[in-house]
Amino acid sequence: MRCHLCLGLSWQPLCKNCLETILAPTPAFRILESGLKVYSFYSYSDIAPLLHTKHTYIGAKIFAQLGHHTFFEFLKTFELPKGICAIPIDDHVRNGYSHSAILAKATKPFLTPLYGSLRAQNHESYSGKSRAFRQANKRDFILTCKDEIDAILIDDIVTTGSTLEEAHETLKKHGVNVLFALVLADAKEG
């Protein structure tokens, strides 16, 4: 197989050299209006072609590599207490896999992924839509995990932050203490 970036021969979709150079994470954070702190590792424009692979079969492997390269490496720098859960946002299977569930899996052994615990009832696509559209068409999340836990939200991209804020509010209503959110990329420029 060839690396998706340099086209060199590789056993994985992204070669080790590209992961260490082109895809060296630049951790950043922003605080949403709800007070939720969101950690990201790339600018959306820097990895957009890789993020768009989530609609393809090879995307499962690319997301697994990116999750390990960012989330796993980030979390191992902390001494987190046992029992913190990773909650992927709407990990409904599309195109054969769930990209948010793959990212949540990358947090093991530091966090305990709770697959299928936060599901959207509205599956309207937000891609390229305005904040007004997103607020008018809420995800309407349902929570299926136990209450009164500590958790970290997991998703691939933060754009306006409306999905993360809605998920945060849903979890708070059920007594879930959301510590922060982890995303691969932040689409906010500047």
Image: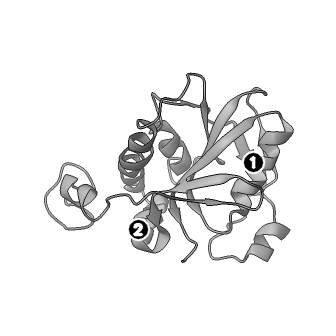
Badge 1 is on which residue?
A: 168
Q: Is residue 56 left or right of residue 39?
A: left
Task: Give me the residue at 21% from left, 52% from top.
Answer: 16
Specify the quadrant of the image occupied by residue 21: bottom left
- Identity of the amino acid at label 1? His
Going from N to C along the chain, the mark reached first, 2 or 1, is 2
Say above or below: 82 vs 36.
Answer: above
Task: Give me the residue at 48% from left, 29% from top.
Answer: 79
Q: Which quadrant: the N terminus? A: bottom left
- Identity of the amino acid at label 2? Ile
Q: Residue 82: x percent and y percent?
A: 56, 22
Q: Nearer the viewer, residue 102 or 163?
A: 163
Badge 2 is on which residue?
A: 47
Residue 14 at least partly seen: no
Task: Give me the residue at 62% from left, 68% from top.
Answer: 159
Task: Give me the residue at 70% from left, 40% from top.
Answer: 178
- Label 1 sits on a secondary structure element that is helix
Residue 67 at least partly seen: yes
Residue extending furthest top?
A: 82
Q: Residue 96: x percent and y percent?
A: 50, 48
Q: Is residue 35 left or right of residue 84?
A: right
